[in-house]
Image (cartoon, rainbow, N blue to C red):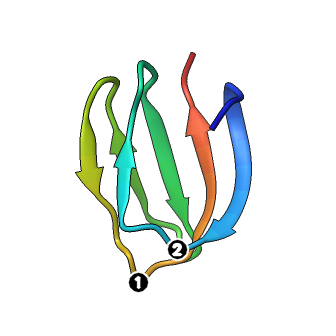
Amino acid sequence: MENCGYNPIRDFYERAKAHGNTFVVRYVNGTSDTTYAWTERALDKGNLVTGVDVYC
């Protein structure tokens, strides 16, 4: 994501990698996953991502 704040998106993802900013991936079922700055993690690849909140 290139913008701070909420970024709408609709797709499926397996991994997340934060290059300097923490962000929260929001799923269609109301759950979320946080990826902290300078880390990477697996995501719920079977759950549709509806948006990402980037903290700047």
In primary-sequence order, the first of circles 1 and 2 is 2
Mark 2: which amino acid?
Phe
Relative to 28, residue 25 above or below = above
- Would you say the residues marked 1 and 2 are in contact, meaning their CB atoms lie under 8 Å apart? yes
Q: Which residue is mark 2?
A: 12
Element at label 2: loop
**Which numbered dot is residue 1?**
none
CA distance for labels 1 and 2? 7 Å
Corner quadrant of residue 32: bottom left
Corner quadrant of residue 26: bottom right
What residue appears at the point 71 percent right and 28 percent down from the top-left corner?
A: 3
Dot 2 crowding, Cα within 10 Å, few <14, some 14–19, many 20+: some
Q: Is residue 53 left or right of residue 23?
A: right
Q: Which residue is mark 1?
A: 46
What residue appears at the point 33 percent right and 63 percent down from the top-left corner?
A: 43
Q: Percent x, y for residue 24?
A: 47, 43
Q: Percent x, y for residue 25?
A: 49, 52
Dot 1 crowding, Cα within 10 Å, few <14, some 14–19, many 20+: few
What residue appears at the point 46 percent right and 79 percent down from the top-left corner?
A: 47
Q: Is residue 11 left or right of residue 7?
A: left
Relative to 31, residue 19 above or below = above
Mark 1: which amino acid?
Gly
What residue appears at the point 72 percent right and 44 percent down from the top-left corner?
A: 7
Quarter placement of the C terminus = top right
Q: Percent x, y for residue 31?
A: 44, 65
